[in-house]
Image (spheres, rainbow, N blue to C red):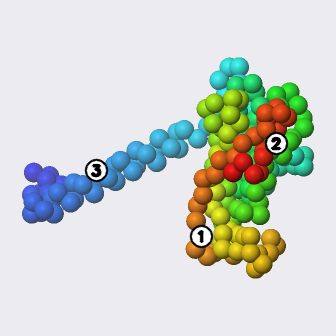
Amino acid sequence: MDAKADYLNSLNTSNRGRFLFCLRRLALMSLVLWLGQAGLSAASLPAGFSEAAVASPAGTDWNGAVGMSFEDNGRMYVWEQAGRVWLKEYGSNAWTLLIDITEEVGAWRDFGMLGFTLDPDFRANGYIYLMYVVDRHHLLYYGTPSYDPAVNEYFNATIGRITRYTARAADGFRSVAYVSR
């Protein structure tokens, strides 16, 4: 017998199982690393696709954009962690602010407004849905004499909220009725 077989035979059943498990894990990790090195080439886009940077409303890179969504008509929506949703018509260079709830949103670390979606029947009802973390100061004091919009209480216990607003059909769903909440 060779040395490896002698060594394996000398191990008790429990230790042999652990040894084989570790050996398999090492082999798998080596394979993953090898495949990872082999696939370091840059990805290429399929035919008919292109890549383009989308500048923010200020004409610069986005600071805190969380996601984007599109309507069937090509209108693009971009939402920011701070609590704003912007829209851009297909073919236009101008951005329109759809909604701004930055006063209410607790946007620190990886918190903030992290979700936005249009209702499946958006063009009929105008409903949009926002998911965000509420600033604790806003949560506790909004509507009271103790409320100060310049104050926030980040890093304190608070809540997450999903809120529905209604976009105004009269202006082509380009603004929100804040009282529709």
Eyeballing the image, is 65 above or below 111?
above
Q: Within 10 angstroms of label 1, few (less than 14), some, or many (20 or more) residues?
A: some
> How many C-alpha atoms fall within 10 Å of the one at disc 3: few (<14), some, or many (≥20)?
few
> First in sequence: mark 3 or mark 2?
3
Residue ID for mark 1: 158
Q: Amino acid at mark 2?
A: Ser
The residue at the point 78 percent across, 78 percent down is 145
Q: What amino acid type is highlighted by mark number 3?
A: Arg
Disc tally is 3
Q: Residue at 90% across / 35% down in the picture? A: 93
The residue tagged with tag 3: helix, strand or loop? helix
Location of residue 66 in the rendering, given as x and y in whole percent from the top left corner: 69, 50
Compared to residue 24, the image places residue 89 above or below, namely above
Q: Nearer the viewer, mark 1 or mark 2?
A: 2
Q: Quadrant of residue 78?
A: top right
Residue 64 visible, this orientation = no
